[in-house]
Image (tube, rainbow, N blue to C red):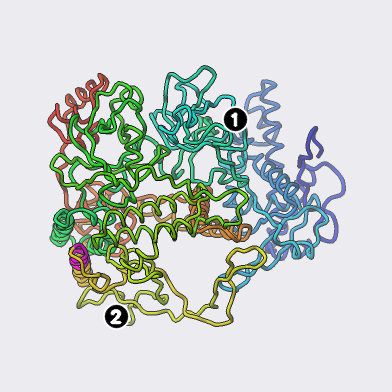
Amino acid sequence: MIRTQEEHLAHYGILRRSGRYPWGSGGSESARNRSYLQTIDKLKQDGMSEAEIARGFGITTTQLRAARSIALSQQKQEKILTAQRLKEKGWSNVEIGKRMGLNESSIRALLAPGEKDKADALHTTANMLKEQVDKKKMVDVGKGVESQIGVTATRLNTAVAVLREHGYELHNIKIQQLGTGKYTTMKVLAVPGTALSFVQRNRDKIQQITDHTVDQGRSFLGIQKPISIASRRIGINYKEDGGDKADGVIYIRPGVKDVSIGNARYAQVRIAVDGTHYLKGMAVYKEDLPAGKDLVFNTNKSNTGRKKDVMKEMSDDPNNPFGAIVRQIPDEHGKVSSAMNIVGSPTKEGAGEEGSWDTWSRNLPSQMLSKQDPKLAQQQLDLTFDRRKLEFDEINALTNPTVRKELLGKFADQTDAAAAHLQAANLPRQSTKVLLPVTTMKPTEIYAPTFRNGERVALVRFPHGGTFEIPELTVNNRNPEARKLLGTAAKDAVGIHHKVAEHLSGADFDGDTVLVIPNNEGKIKTTPALKELQGFDPQVYKIPKDSPIPRITSSRKQNEMGKISNLITDMTIHGAKTDELARAIRHSMVVIDSEKHELDFVQSEKDHGILGLKEHYQGGKKAGARTLISKAGAELRVPERRPRPASRGGPIDKATGKKVFEETGVMIPERRSRRDPATGKRVYVDTGRMVPKRQVTTKLADAEDAFSLSSGTRMESIYATHSNKLKAMANNARKEAVNTKGTPYSPSAKAAYSKEVTSLNAKLNIAKRNAPLERQAQLLANSRVSQTRQANPHMEPEDVKKVKQLALNEARARTGAKKTKIDITQSEWDAIQAGAISTSKLEEILTHSDVDTVRNLAMPKFTPKMTSSKVATAQTMLANGYTQAEVADRLGVGLTTLKVSLSE
């Protein structure tokens, strides 16, 4: 039981600590195992149940089953080792079988590759568990932990039984749920000699098992530690070296494995340095780096003689060391192979790297369009409505009633969301691009390979104060530096002069994005940069290190940013003067950098007369959003409600199509915030009163009439009319859906399409298997978030959001929860149309299907594609340095058609 460097559980034992007497007192471990199993089998043959046998031994049924699993595992290990030993001596499978009293097929099974690994799985799990308990003293081994570590509940329970044989303590304690007040039992495994009373007194020290197995217990991997780059390999371009002109860019040497970003040309990354700090920014390959430097970081900070002054400190949280959701780059064995931690969800392939920004939504938000000419807003909103009306008419014309009902319901929900979000249709060829600096570009030019050389484009960054923060540039795709840095086929990056970034409300190059819109016709209104903003440096509000002035919190910054953004929107819609807008913009620049650079936003608010602007344009110094555009997304708390049950008419009014809700009447303790005199932070305390439980919605989503939120301007009238039209369309779609009867079922069609029906049923079963896994993932994630928040009671909302996403990503990965959409083929669709699937089964299939696939099958549209010869020509032209826009024009196809054809 003792190994060279560490204590290891080499033998399991057979629950000799359980019951009145030890099991077996002589002979080998193998003999005791056989005796135990034979005794249990004999008692079962005599008609005794497991419960009766366990009572007879003075143990629980769980212990009985665990002992049997241990004995079987050890016996199998012995058989495998014996078979392997005889095989190594040259014996045949038949000879080995005769020696061991087994047939030849059993010997083949014992010698099969990986069989010993499977038999060792319990041993490995028990040792992992032992290491965790020895390290953490008390760990949770209750319900759900088996999913956390990737083994079965039986294997976990058996491993726990193994440790109990070696003196480890198992205790059950009651934990109160903070939300419901009910109690949950937690199973705690502790080091030998730990009393129940100690566990109860120190329940805050109970920890989770953080190791995770990817092969059902044969090996365990902890959360992978990021590869750390030595600071000596990193060069710094400080402000004095011109680093401010490429602030946030990290140049990386091509061909170096541990700093590779794979086949992408650029990616938004976090890079660990010396195990204590990290770099954040946009990584891009560059060949001419200084000798001995594999990374060069550009910063607008001055040289203090200490490299790490321009870096950020890594968090102590091993699950989130960079304060961002990242995905690591693995090698063929699943181990991290690069120091590049790409920003983006681990469950979304390609997130945070070349090509991902091109997939962002192309709708025009009201925050941008409301600052343009009302005619443009009217044009794009009308186009949005017309597109939805066309889709509504197409769905309504479908012949399959069940499919029509399903698509109408989803269409109604999507249209309701559109009515609340106020987004308008995109302009032709607009797309989202990530910014990178090119020092030799002129301030009036842009390198944009997906746009035509020489055309004018407008750049819009969010949020922006007005048309004076929208530069208009000319595309120059001939710049040698840009072509070398980004290539001619860059999917979604553009190169600009650093002065353009300043024009874009102070953008930098660590992953900032812009909307690029072709503007040869001048539809996007741009105006010169405000003189009042030139030379303004928010750093004048830097709080001295020894100053007692409180620093802004993340949540307060978000709140202040929302208030100033709403004020700027309201001022613009009400025609504020440029000098007034400049005051608000300068203050917003201070607010947006207040947390990052510790700026005194309160003094900025006074200096820029923000309260006076609020009084004039919003009706009071403490007033909030005034116009429909700024009010639309504002949070609104309403008494908790639920859809009206079918017994009282159902969730949809059949006459109007409106959703009908009922209040739940649930009451909860009232909590109010106050400042903790000891810490100075705000905490929540119970008042002793009960109040209705509330849920969150938005003002426009809850409003019957959008005009009720308007202050009466022309722009608001355009948006209010649009919102009301969409809400009416959504109600009409629901009315049609709720009054549509299901598809007639045809037994003869089921027989004719038996192959398709069998296939659809199989696909549905696979899709439904995810439901319990997803429930488990949600439970695990909620537990993880609760523990994190208890350990960090003053977490900011932004950090809580990140923790939630990280916990859910991790829980889904550990439980294997992954939503599998049903991919309906054309022949299966024909079976559906013929009535081969019952209404209830078809509703289930449609629920688990991709709505776009169903829509395309129900309403097929022609998608233009390039011929194979054109694809080959396009590939050759791109390889020879032509941009995507030039290739598309030369071949006479649209840019989207080119991209789709090249990706197939």
Relative to 369, say whether 98 is above or below. Answer: above
Residue 399 shows in this picture: no
Q: Identify which amino acid the numbered label 1 is placed on.
A: Gly
Residue most extreme to the top:
291
Q: Which comes sooner in the sequence, label 2 or label 1?
A: 1
User: What kind of element bears circle 2?
Assistant: loop
Q: Amino acid at mark 2?
A: Gly
CA gap between label 2 and label 1 equals: 73 Å
Residues at circles 2 and 1 in contact by the CB criterion of under 8 Å: no
Please state which of residues 23 and 607 is positioned toward the viewer in this rendering.
607
Question: Element at badge 1?
Answer: loop
Figure check: 853 above or below 283: below
The mark lying in front, picked from 2 and 1, is 1
Q: Residues within 10 Å of mark 1 (few under 14, many from 20)?
A: few
Return the x and y of residue 471 as percentages of the image width and height. 26, 41
Residue at point 79%, 65% (across, down): 197
Q: Main secondary structure of the magenta part?
A: helix
Which quarter of the rendering shows the C terminus?
Answer: top left
The residue pinned by badge 1 equals 305
Residue picked out by circle 2: 649
Where is residue 268 drawn, in percent x and y?
43, 37
Residue 202 is covered by the magenta coloring? no
The residue depicted at 47 percent of the width and 76 percent of the height is 693
Q: Identify which residue, 210 or 721, lies in the foreground.
A: 721
Q: Is residue 9 left or right of residue 674?
A: right
Q: Give the position of the N terminus as an image quadrant.
A: top right
> Magenta segment, which residues?
715-725
Left or right placement of residue 565 versus residue 392 in this view? right
- Relative to residue 703, is residue 73 depicted above or below? above
- Horizontal and vertical percent for residue 551? 55, 55
